[in-house]
Amino acid sequence: MAKEKKQPRPKAVTPKGFRDYFGTEVTERTHMLSQIAEVYHRYGFEALETSAVETVEALGKFLPDVDRPNEGVFAWQEDDKDWVALRYDLTAPLARVAAQYRNDLPSPYRRYAMGPVWRNEKPGPGRFRQFYQCDADTVGAATVAADAEICAMLSDTLETVGIPRGDYIVRVNNRKVLNGVMEVAGVLDPSNPDALVEERGIVLRAIDKFDKFGEDGVRLLMGKGRLDESGDFTKGAGLSDEQADIVMGFMTARRDTGAATAARLRELVGASVVGNEGVNELEYMAELLDAQGYGADRILIDPSVVRGLGYYTGPVFEAELTFEILDEKGRPRQFGSVSGGGRYDDLVKRFTGQEVPATGVSIGVDRLLAALRAKGRMGSVATGPVVVTVMDKDRMADYQAMVAELRNAGIRAEVYLGNPKNFGNQLKYADKRNSPIAIIEGGSEKENGVVQIKDLILGAQIAANATLDEWKERPSQYEVPRSELVAKVREILESQGK
């Protein structure tokens, strides 16, 4: 009889493009989300939590840098033949909610949402298939005052989470201006907006990669196409040199002041109706922001911002961090964009058949956390719990009583639940948890009504740096009456904080 083949053990590996988050990372993200939510709430936005799964039909074909519908999502077919997929952003679900509950929601509807999104794209350094987004949107407000408010709120949010003024800039543009420029360049025909759609999409994506590819690379993408270092060829828009010159003129239209930039943009859009409408909207936004104290040091009109998504219809904005960090090869570079958004008046129309104005912003939480860590403003080792050691496993109730007292006093604490036989292993455990204090109560301490309290932080510092005299002057272990346990622990924790 043939021997049954042994089933191989599964590999303990994280799927490609995904990662695990531990302790401090999760705590820091939770804290940041709380800070962001506080700002959004202060601006009058309400929380919304939608399903992680949407119908493929509801998600539509607006995934960034993807031409074919449903490409780039994690999708599967249900038994009833309908296709569903994990959401790739938080905006498409909002459009569905705004249409589904339009008779119940206030108008305008102001909501914020936070959570993971999934994209079935090629992963790379710092690019994952699952990541957190934090969005705020206003649905039902046609005025660009709503866009100006979003930009102001984004500025406040960055400063609240720890990005000081001067380390960021919110750059603002208007897609109507770009449409006017493309009309002048012959890439957009107002009488036939469905013509040259593919070419305009290529132009948009090319402009959006200006920082990455530079002027020469963008010109190649506007023309015949671009061959990268790996040998991959990206199809171009087929524009002539004269047409490309007009679009590049738009890219470099920024001047020292918002008024000067607007004047230059008016020159570029010429007689285009939609182009001039976009310039008027930019000027109005600048006026509103200036009235609230948001000057060009915080929010700036910048024509080079276009945003890659095809559904933007008016103002677009992007928050960029301007400080330098070192890349993986030790070279200095600017951190770059951590947030973006804009107006998308046609998205809800897919469901209702009627135009519903909407504008919003999305913050890449993981990128923002990475930026704060790169600046040394996050990422320090988190302090662990106070550890109550176990000297006698038959007296577990005594140790649990201690830890309950500490917790009831608001102090993070735990009882060691491993094998208590080796006391040294208990201290090693406390060290691995980065615990500030260990509590010790053996049989003699119990008999005398006292406990030993070991300052693990100070003990480690003394062992590493202090002379024998300093050791004597600064004891790291104290014997106190059992009744003074909480008070002494609190005193040590306060001294460690100082």
Image (cartoon, rainbow, N blue to C red):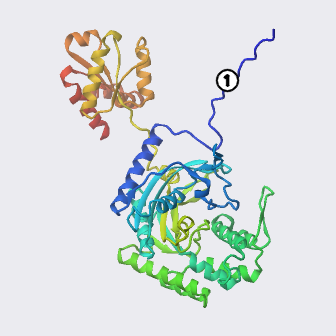
- Secondary element at tag 1: loop
Can residue 355 be seen? Answer: yes
Q: Is residue 24 left or right of residue 471?
A: right
Residue positioned most to the front: 80
Q: How many numbered marks does the figure carry?
A: 1
Rendering coords of residue 121 (x, y %): 66, 51
Q: Is residue 422 above or below residue 138?
A: above
Mark 1 lies on residue: 9
Q: Residue at x 44, y 60 (%)?
A: 101
> Dot 1: few (<14), some (14–19), or many (≥20) neighbours within 10 Å?
few
Q: Residue at x 23, y 28 (%)?
A: 486
**Quadrant including the C terminus:** top left
Can residue 164 be seen? Answer: no
Q: Amino acid at mark 1?
A: Arg
Q: Is residue 156 left or right of residue 201?
A: left
Rendering coords of residue 432 (x, y %): 45, 28
Residue positioned most to the bottom: 271
Q: Is residue 83 above or below residue 11?
A: below
Rendering coords of residue 489 (x, y %): 26, 29
Rendering coords of residue 286 (x, y %): 44, 78
Query: 139 or 255: which is nearer to us?
Result: 139
Q: Residue at x 38, y 50 (%)?
A: 34
Q: Is residue 316 above or below residue 421?
A: below
**Quadrant including the N terminus:** top right
Q: Is residue 275 above or below residue 208?
A: below
Q: Is residue 223 left or right of residue 260?
A: right
Question: Which quadrant of the figure has residue 383?
Answer: top left
